[in-house]
Every structure is written in structure tokens, then in C-alpha cells.
Amino acid sequence: MKTLIVDDNATNRKLLRVTLEAEGLDVVEASDGVNALAVMCGTPVDAVITDILMPRMDGYRFCYEVRNSKLFCDVPLIVYTNTYTSPGDEKTGLDLGADRFLRKPSQAGEIAAALRALKEQPRRARSGQIPAPRGLELMKEYSEALVRKLEEKNADLQLAAEQLTQMNLVLKLQKRDLEKAREDLRTANEELEARVRSRTAALESANKDLESFGHSVAHDLRAPLRAIDGFSRILMEECGAQLNPQGRHHFQQIVQNIRGMNQLIDELLKLSRIGRSEMKRSPVNLSALARTLLGKLQETQPDRQVEIVIAPDIIVPGDEPLLRIALENLLNNAWKFTGKREKARIEFGFTEDESPPACFVRDNGAGFDMAYAGRLFGPFQRLHPESEFPGTGIGLATVQRIIHGHGGRIRAESVKGEGTTFYFTL
């Protein structure tokens, strides 16, 4: 069954063609009524399906011309539209010669069934030529319908134009507000950049002054300490025999405190330098570092029985010298606070239970009360008496500064008398 599709929209024609060919129909195409009449003169067709709104010759006029043609007056003709869909539009189409009036979109089976049903009807049952008096009347109705549709379209266009004008006004107001906001943002950014430059310069100057002050203080503090240490040793050598045991103990305490003061000065200088040097990142094997550091601690106290567990191949991106300092402080703490355990255990590992996943250093040592955890990373903050566990109180502050410098975080979990775990991310 050869079917002619008449539609000015190429995409619509293609979609309908594919639909009808899938139903087993043979399809030809035309872009409007004039083109369709030319096609029908050269190619006999069994049925026609036409749109209404088309240039040169619309679907209504095409129906009228087909019915008034001696060659095509009995060809089955279906109007297929999504623009002219009112009952009046349908009546006009049927009066002008259409056999069926379908609204887009319709099911492929429905269109094909309508075409086949019309083809199978007896010739006399289909639309034939329109008598001349009736033709003039229909053309008048067609002209009125066309004028009415144009007026409706014009009203729709006028309404759309009014809405577009209102929208343009709103967009102009929004554009003006946006330009003002953009200008305010640019001004604010310039002010912020100026403040940042000023504060950065002030901070750099303060850091230089602080570093200079730190070295000066360290030098000024070490000079009298060296003098005290030297004179104490001389006094011990020259007069030690005349002192009783308590006096010699006092001298030993003086020397020990001098050594602790020197260590504290070194730790303070180390803390002040962290973060001011340029960080050089590379893959760092923390497992190998932990194994080396704990091996050195075992050498200092070979008699201690400590179970050491190190997870293999924990490799992270970071500054190796700084990460060595951080890990050394954490492992030194674990070693120190498990010193009174008969069966000490120190573990370095990695866990995905944290968010994000974290490295950890865990021990079963003295632990601490979590109520004081907020003081843990502050300089000189000690949670145990120095007489019980000696130290400078600087180590964890140093660790925190290194971890923060790597964009990470560190926290601790502990139970007093059972041990502590430090979790850190990079």
C-alpha cells in the first residue's frame, strides 16, 4: 500500500515514515500541498496523510483540491495535526474532503489501521468530488476558519510578546543587580587581597623576629647553663670528697636539671622551625621508619620485653624529615608510657574504620583520662607528673604542627591504666 505523507517538517515526515514502514506500508513524501499534487501526478498513491499548517498550500486547501480533481477525488485522505485540534477544525477538515481526522501523536497501529480501512472501503463510500455550489460554501467556511485561526495565533503571539517584554524588563533588573553585585564582589576581593598582603607581610616579619628572638634567647639561656654546669663539675671534682651523700645527690640533681633545660631549649627551637621551612613531598614508607625508630629504642633498653607490631608497606606522600620527627615523638611516647608494663605492646598500623582512613600508633601503657584530652597537644601540657614520666611537654605539640602542615589531623583515644592510640591522617 503506497502512502503519501504531506508535512513541511522534515523531522515529522521522517518519524511518520519510519512508523508506517514498520507497519508494512510503502511511503513517499511531500513538503506541502503544491508539492504533494505534483507527486501524485507522477506517482499513483493508495492513500494520503497530511498535516494542516504548511506553506504555499495548507492541508485544508490540499484536501479541497484533491476532492475537486478528477484524477484523485477518490483517494483516501487522512488529516494528521497537532495545531488544528478543535471540534470546529475537525468539521472543517471533514467538510473539505478528509476521510479521517487524527490528532498527533497517534499510535502507529491506529494510523495504519485507518489507512487500510479507508483503502478497503468501496469507492462510493469514500469522499468524492465536491459539487460546485457546496464547494463555494466550503471555501467560505475554510476562509473564515483560516481567519479565525490566524486571529487566535495573533492573540497568542501578542500575549507571548507581552510576556517577553515583561521578562526582558525582569532580566534587565537582574542584570543590573548582578553587575552591582559583581562590582561589590570585585571591591571586596581587592580589599581582602590588600588585607592578606598586609597581614602576610606582618606575619613574615613577626616570624623572622620570632626566629631571631628564639635563637637569641636560646644562646642567652645556654650561656649561664654552661657556666652552672661547668662550675658544678669543678666543684664536684675538687670538693666532692668533702660532701656527704645528700650533698652529692644535690649536685647530681643540678647536673640533671641542666641537661633537661638544654633539651627543652632544643625542643622549643625545633618546634619554632617546623612549618617555616619549605615542605618537599615524596612517597614515605612509614612502616620502614617505624621499624628503624623502634629498633633504636630497643638498643637503648635491650632488657625490656616489648611486643612490637608494624603493619607492612604503609606508604604516604609527605615530607620525610618532618614525618620522621612526628613518628619518632609518637613512638618515643609509646615506649616511655609502657615502661612500667611487664608485657608491653606497641603497634603501628593503618585502619579504614576512621573517616578518612588513618595511620595509628597504639600502646598498652599508662593511658590518661580523656577528660583532659583537650590539653594534650598544647606546649608544656603534661598529663602525668614528671617524676613518674619525664619529658619536656613539647613532643605532641610538635607532632600536631607537622600533621596540620600536611593538611591532616590527629586525635587520641585513651583509657587510664590501659593504653593510648593516636590516629593521624595526611
Image (tube, rainbow, N blue to C red):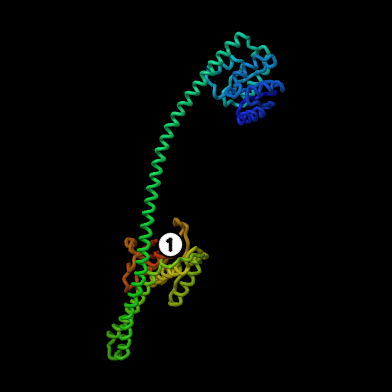
Residue at the spot 43% in from the left edge and 75% down from the top edge: 304
Residue at the spot 52% in from the left edge and 21% down from the top edge: 150
Query: Visible in this render: residue 341?
Result: no
Which image quadrant: the N terminus? top right
Q: Of 218 and 266, which appears nearest the observer?
A: 218
Residue 305: image location, x then y, percent = 44, 73
Residue 318: image location, x then y, percent = 48, 64
Q: Of 199 and 90, which appears nearest the observer?
A: 199
Residue at which label 1 appears = 424
Residue at the spot 43% in from the left edge and 60% down from the top edge: 408
Q: Of 333 and 164, which appears nearest the observer?
A: 164
| SS category of the residue bearing label 1 | strand
Residue 215: image location, x then y, percent = 36, 74
| Quarter of the figure with residue 29 | top right
Q: Amino acid at mark 1?
A: Phe
Dot 1, how many residues are within 10 Å of its Cα: few (below 14), some (14-19), or many (20+)? many
Residue at the spot 60% in from the left edge and 21% down from the top edge: 59
Residue 99 relative to residue 217: left or right? right
Q: Is residue 360 depicted above or below 150 in this figure?
A: below
Residue 165: image location, x then y, percent = 43, 31
Query: Visible in this render: residue 116?
Result: yes
Q: Is residue 326 depicted above or below 152 in this figure?
A: below
Residue 343 relative to residue 1: left or right? left
| Quarter of the figure with residue 177 | top left
Which image quadrant: the C terminus? bottom left
Residue 329 relative to residue 21: left or right? left
